[in-house]
Image (tube, rainbow, N blue to C red):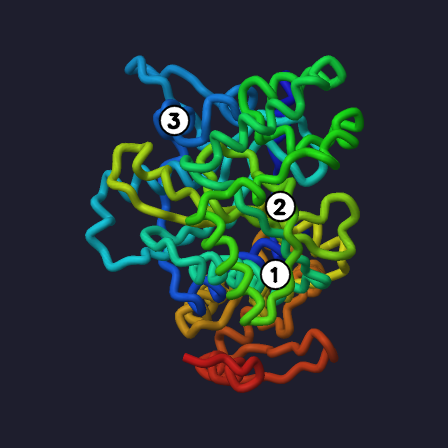
Amino acid sequence: MTKYQRVTGMLDVLFDDQPYWRFILAKIQETADLFGYQRIDTPVLEQASLFVRGVGQGTDIVEKEMYIFEDRDGDQLALRPEFTAGIMRAYVENGLHTLPTPLRVWTTGPLFRHERQQKGRYRQHSQFDVEVIGEQDPAVDVEVISLAWHLFTNLGFYGLRLYINSTGCPVCKPAYIKTLVNYFEPFADKLPPDDKMRLQKNPLRILDSKEPLTQPLLENAPRITDHLCADCASHFARLKTYLEAIGRLYVVDYRIVRGLDYYTKTVFEIKADGLGSQDTICGGGRYDGLIEELGGRPTPGIGFGSGIERYVLALRHLGVEPPPEPLPQVTVSYLGETAKLAALQLVETLRNEKIGAMLTPGDRSLKAQLKSADRAKAAFAVILGEDEVKAGQAIMRDLSSSQQMVVNLADVPGWLKDRLQVTG
């Protein structure tokens, strides 16, 4: 018989991790509401050309990582590797430009990249994504950064550090790329194979290289901030001024370029203390030309993405304990078939009264049923036997003290509400 296993790079989220997911998703919703962002959801499947055109032909995502297949209709489809291109497609297709601007949206969900599996990096992973569409003002850049900062602080991260850079725009970026290529060409024979390919296909990515042979060369590489056009230089200067105005410390990191072709002007990363080498918890930036590239009218935008699995690992590493899941606090045990029918009715009544309750099924002994209640960490067990049902009564057992008392069956919901502080 075949023993099935999960696909390489995929992850089962089991019960020990679920309180973290619940906690994280609740904080995401709370933060999005605080900043006035609306939720949007897009399909997991998109036309493959959307990402080729939007993300860029020379990127690792397109060349090495996308899951692409031909469906039964002969279309080339891809499992989404990132959110932004799909959200911009939805923006154009659904005429969202008619809504008041800037349009502030967020989403969460799974992304798919055929990467080398490692801790915290999976081929199916979930992200929290934020986008602001339709505004060039660097004050919006600050808002997006502040949203991320607020979320991470509330999740329990500490020692947050902000790193910013500008990647220029179509006016100034081509000349800088030429300068960068000219700088590296004399060293081309010394570069590792991946960096040689980056130099040919996507030169900016070489600034993000982690290769030991390339690192010394990066020290004297030309900086894009020295080659910005007047518009990009002004935007970057105002970004820094606005960050300083709200007391947000930052470091200009000339090597931040991010991995996608659509980035223009602002790019940023946020890191946190206590996480070792995997300390980057958020990255994003502007994509002022992406919507036009996808067939829409020229529309600026900025956003970021951040992996939820990474949050879980990081919070565990930092010793942050999420609130326990609100499991039912009441179990209903029974002895005999008549009592079982009454127990089924009582459980339904309790749930209708917003009291979390579980039946202990299987016609087991009372001792076994109470052990099950203890394992479920219930506060009270309601015990029904044939005699209790005939008398219209129930035994209420406090599982923390083992004390018991008898109450009328009709009074059970009210008795529990008084002790569990249930409202509604």
Amino acid tagged 3: Arg
Residue carrying label 1: 152
Residue 206 x/y as whole percent: 64, 28
Residue 250 x/y as whole percent: 64, 59
Residue carrying label 3: 53
Amino acid tagged 1: Phe
Q: Secondary structure at mark 3?
A: helix
Mark found first going from the N terminus, 3 or 1: 3
Q: Disc 1 to disc 2, how far (Cα)?
A: 14 Å
- Please tell me whether mark 1 or mark 2 is closer to you in this view: 1
In the drawing, what numbered circle is on residue 309?
2
Mark found first going from the N terminus, 3 or 2: 3
Whether residue 273 sits left or right of residue 87 in the image: it is right
Q: Disc 3 to disc 1, how far (Cα)?
A: 32 Å
Asked whether 291 or 1 is in front, the reply is: 291
Q: Secondary structure at mark 2?
A: helix
Mark found first going from the N terminus, 1 or 2: 1
The quarter holding residue 372 reads bottom right
